Amino acid sequence: MINPRQITRIAPMNLFTEMRVLVIASLEHMQAEGVLPEGLDFANVAVEPPRDAAHGDMATNAAMVLAKPAKMKPRDIAQTLAEKLATDARIASAEVAGPGFLNLRLAPALWQGVVASVLETGAEFGRSTMGQGKKVNVEYVSANPTGALHVGHTRGAVFGDALASLLDFVGYDVTREYYINDGGAQVDVLARSVYLRYLEAHGQEVAFEDGTYPGDYLIPVGAALKDKVGDAYVGQDEDVWLVEVREFATEAMMDLIRDDLRALGVEMDVFFSEKALYGTGRIEAALAALESKGLIYEGVLEPPKGKTPEDWEPREQTLFRSTDHGDDVDRPVKKSDGSWTYFAPDIAYHFDKISRGFDALIDVFGADHGGYVKRMKAAVSALSDGQVPLDIKLTQLVKLWKNGQPFKMSKRAGTFVTLRDVVEQVGPDVTRFVMLTRKNDAPLDFDFDKVLEQSKDNPVFYVQYAHARVCSVLRKAAEAGIAVDDETLIAADLGKLSHEAEIAVAKKVAEWPRLVEIAGRTNEPHRVAFYLYELASELHAFWNKGNDDASLRFIQEGDAATSQAKIALARSVAIVISAGLGILGVTPAQEMR
RNA sequence: GCACCCAUAGCUCAGCUGGAUAGAGCGCUGCCCUCCGAAGGCAGAGGCCAAAGGUUCGAAUCCUUUUGGGUGCGCCA
């Protein structure tokens, strides 16, 4: 018998990587004995959960990967490897299967050790050093400062925020950043709209023509402007007030946006102003960097095929040779009148990120920005000489449902759903979790009724319920006079967790460190949400077994030691759920009401 | 016209740097509460992974082509 605690002390948290280390060591041993030739590449040797749990706890493809380079039959390699592995106390059995898979069953003590490991490391269980402390910049939301955030922004905000937390968890040094588009024509439009509201506040009749924002949300901004400057701008020309009002209005909008983000629980590290790039030579510097690489030239673009703008005429512009870095056509950085295109400050902004020393950049855009992916990647590739990878994640549309009907958004009809609307109706936790129950590149249905349903159909409820159940067990146990503080649970005799149903729960918990690494590697936080659902299912399934078999209940009357072992298992589930929800930005529920 | 994203059970969707007999929920069918943990539980049926080629010991996954859907395409941001 092995003592689970002893194993824990020496074991890394991720059992899969631990077993891979063992497999590699055994392979090297086989090389030393001359069974395997030297010079083999073990990079593709994997230790993974088998698709079918009946095959065992873990499977390795080592024999199949190495068969060809070693010029041996896969089953022969597998057989020898199996014999080697079987001598390790941690391996309960190693069987060759199929074309050369090696199925491993681990000693129960290892699974029990996972529970101990979770209790000892708490919320840190599963935290990885995969990122090696590399600096990553995650840019998300970056909505124009012209109004409140809407549902589409909400998804980007939740996704970006969860991704940032996930990357932090797997060992990156993460910066959360918001790019304020306060340098373009749209903030002039904002300023003019606010000016109209300002005049209105002075009792004037105003008309909102095309090219202005007629929304009511600017009424208080106009009033506030009146409070600040009195009638100084009344009857004045635009060149008198535009700059000041623009400043005032964008500040007001950013306050609005910051409030929205706060309501959702999003805290940015950096708000980067586009405006700060103008007139400071920074755009020029970025373009000079490209020019020095011979990537800037004066030229005339071909009209886009299939959809030629009506007023198309060939004009000479300053172009970036993005085709040298994977783009389809070269992109203009200056308009024909010599002013910057939108792309130019974007280049400068990313140049700034690179010069701040980030090892990797991630941009989270809405799906309507898909056309900018290649040119941004080209720009970053060119500016960093291919040294800084840029990953761009596009979040697809959110389709709203209410009372079984699709909810159409229309600014004009006033059926415009804001982030605030969503958060106020269902709360930030539900909003965040639901937004992460889909891959970022798949459209998402958000049903106001279903997300609040208290049933198994609703993953938010199901996961929260699992956590609340564990909390309930802890309360009940304490009432029954059983000590359930983590100190006591850590010292519990986990060897009592021998029932296969208990081991099954521990196995799911053991997947957590592996899962977060996969999610972190692929920049896909939704995997965390799906895992939490599975983990919750395991706990609920185990709970239900207690209905038929009283010996599987967490609290065993008159047997504190057994109760504590079982509760330790439950507690480990709660800790992982709590950590996972933490990555998603969701507060775990202590009880369901 | 071009580029990007998507296509998996009746429905909504997972599916790990390519692994074994492709999974979950809903819906459907059948069982299970006089009480001790049913805002439920257990079991079953249901698939040509859009199509065709290719790479590989091995493909839902990688490559090519096709079909069907979404998004975008100089002087908007």
Image (cartoon, coloured by chain):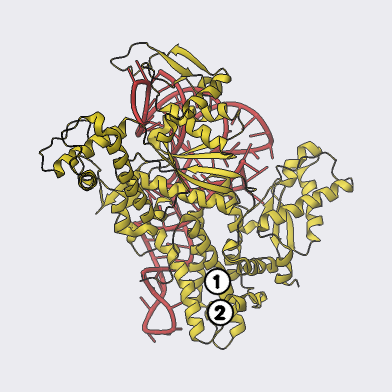
Chain colours: A yellow, B red
A224 displayed left or right of A574: left
Under circle 1, the secondary element is: helix
Residue density around tag 2, few if under 14, some if 14–19, many if 20 or more, within 10 Å: many
In the displayed structure, A8 sits above or below A193; it is: below
Of all chains, the one bearing label 2 is A
In the displayed structure, B54 sits above or below A11; it is: above
**Labels 1 and 2 touching (C-beta < 8 A):** yes
Which sits earlier in the primary sequence, circle 1 or circle 2? 2
Name the residue nearer the viewer: A130 or A42.
A130
Of all chains, the one bearing label 1 is A
Q: Residue at x 78, y 65 (%)?
A: A89
* Distance (Cα) linking label 1 and label 2: 9 Å
For label 1, the residue is A571
Residue density around tag 1, few if under 14, some if 14–19, many if 20 or more, within 10 Å: many
For label 2, the residue is A484
Q: Residue furthest right?
A: A33
B45 displayed left or right of A225: right
Location of the C terminus of chain A by quadrant is bottom left
Of the residues shown, which amino acid type is indicated by label 1? Arg
Q: Residue at x 24, y 54 (%)?
A: A403
Of the residues shown, which amino acid type is indicated by label 2? Val
Q: Position of residue A455 (x, y in %)?
A: 37, 64
Q: Residue at x 71, y 62 (%)?
A: A11
Q: Position of residue B66 (x, y in %)?
A: 44, 23
